[in-house]
Image: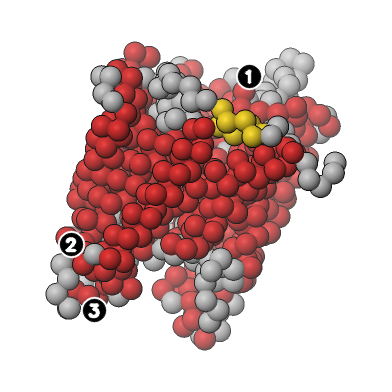
Amino acid sequence: MEFFDIYLVEALINGVLLGGVLALLALGLNLIFGVIDVVWICYAELIMLGMYAMYFLFSVYQLPWPLAALITIAIVGVLGLVLHYLVIAPLLGSPPINQLLATGGVLFFLQSAATVMFGIDFRNLGIRLPVLEAGDMFISYARLLAFGAALVGMLIVYLFLTRTYTGTAIRAISQDREIMTLMGVDSRRIYLITSALGGSLAGLAACLLVLQYDVHPFVGLSFGPITFLICVLGGLGNFAGGFVAAFLFAEIISLGGLYSDLEWGYVLAFAFFIIMMFIRPAGLLARRT
Amino acid sequence: MNRYLPWIAGAVLVALPFVYHSPYPLHILILVLIWSFAYTSWSIMGRFGLVSLGHGGFMGVGAYVTALLWNHAGLSPWIGIPIALVAAGVLALVVAWPCFRFRIVGHYFALVTLALSGIVLQVITATRDWTGGSLGYTPERYQGGSSIYALQFADKETWYLIALFVWAVGLAIWYAVDRSMIRYALEAISEDEDAAAAAGVNVTAEKLKITVLSAVMTAFSGALYCQYQMFISPDTVSGIAVSLQMVFAVVVGGIYVALGPTVGAVITILMAEGLRISFGTKAVGYDNLVYGVLLVVFIIFLPKGILGSLMEARWLRRSPPQRQVQPGPA
């Protein structure tokens, strides 16, 4: 196999495109962890519900897609708010493992709620986006769109965090939660805003993922674990690290899938994760202490 | 009276299959006992704050290695199970040693082990030419059905006694750990690793011992499950869902008491079966719906589990202040 193989280039490009969406997923989770210090194990299940929302709004109720996407983002944002209010807030003082397990319980709940409400059929939007042909490579338009929208979403979050008063407060809280409450920041309000923001990011991810994947109640399991691993690999709460890790992971999965089955791509990615944990336990971009 | 209670209960449990032959309740009891053993294996390390989400992986290794050796190499489970246990032990060692050496604790340990159960699940699925992939795998029946050589028995009574014995051994190991020095070492470690190390505890070695013990026991429960059910699939014995199921059952029952995992297994399995029967097939998912809600409610309001809270309430009435209430795992 010569070095500049066309399939290799195609896999590399597809890896970059997958990386964009994974980076968006990781950003939402990292935001929650960085600010509230809680891991939402059920994060991917929120995305699953968002995908259903998009499906119903777009395919069943026939809303125009920008409106459907906005409503989806709002719905999942509210879900994030509710999750924080009902489950996380009562557990803020308890051991981290209990918080982790409680959101795990929410995972079971959401999965089976979706099963009960929507059944276990696979559903999709029923639209086929064209495939872009460049040279001899085939690049799906849906992936390109997802990549672009993910980048725009991340840019907006970045601007929000750096340019607005609330965003500054969120970043300050994630650096020192005790001092900031003394400084007059209402941490409960910030937590609620962050949860809603994290939820909205899940909603955005849902709008993009539903273009490429069929939605069913267990779809969260296919990208949930990957998202956690990316966040940990990048260093939980470290936005830049999560970004880099998302692209690394996506390339490994994509290239592994090129040379063998897709499962082996995942095996490789998991193994890479475990090895990296031993080399850089605090995350890819952690400062050496 | 209290001293004889365990013996009486034990005698009743042993005598049960000789007077009661109804197959379905016996089947449920066997499942409860096997899973109780698996949950007890998890809680042996979980009670010291070592929350592993990789135990689904160890269980999968136990089940699949045993079944694969029997089908492809013709090795009796009497040899296959020890090999599977060694494999699980080595796997635990390979993953846990660097974890403990580089001080990967808490969230990070849970997520590294989560990756482990993900790997085991994907490897089983990817090697579908050998393992049948996600369709599942069946150990071949030995000629007549029942055979000690193949560790296959057609009647439920034999399986009940085997499962009961294994479960009792699991409890005995729990008590042995509870009374040994390793318990004090690990409790010190879960409070403060640096202080424990300064006091002369070999942190890495103590954690490794308990992890390997726990992993080997879990692998054994997987092998047992495989021999009893004669059917395994990646989703029932490995992967992240099974790992979470273990943690939840233990939390529901009570993580700090010997019978907590057993109570957790009884409650979760009876609940799942009860919901399944009462709702029937028309409402798939209701059992997990209730299950999920209960777990969240439990973790918020009863973090010590049902049995843990009951025992504490009884104990508080008898002699008030003496012992501090155990804090949750860090």
Position of residue B235 measured from the top left corner of the image (x, y, whole percent) = 54, 32
Secondary structure at numbered mark 2:
helix
- What is the distance, in whole Å, between disc 1 and disc 2 at their CAs? 60 Å
Examine the rendering and report whether any part of residue B307 can be seen: no
**Horizontally, is A12 left or right of A92 in the view?**
right
Residue behind mark 1: B154
Which image quadrant for residue B160? top right
Residue behind mark 3: A179
Position of residue A71 measured from the top left corner of the image (x, y, whole percent) = 24, 35
Which image quadrant for residue A111? top left
Residue behind mark 2: A188
**Marks 3, 2 in one chain:** yes
Please tell me whether mark 1 or mark 3 is closer to you in this view: 3
Q: Residue at x 46, y 39 (%)?
A: A146
Amino acid carrying label 3: it is Ile
**Marks 1, 2 in one chain:** no
Residue B93 or residue B268, whichever sits in front: B93
Secondary structure at numbered mark 1:
loop
Amino acid carrying label 1: it is Ala
Who comes first in sequence, dot 3 or dot 2?
3
Please tell me whether mark 1 or mark 2 is closer to you in this view: 2
Residue B65 or residue A171, whichever sits in front: A171
Q: Which quadrant of the figure contains the N terminus of chain A?
A: top right
Position of residue B172 measured from the top left corner of the image (x, y, whole percent) = 53, 53
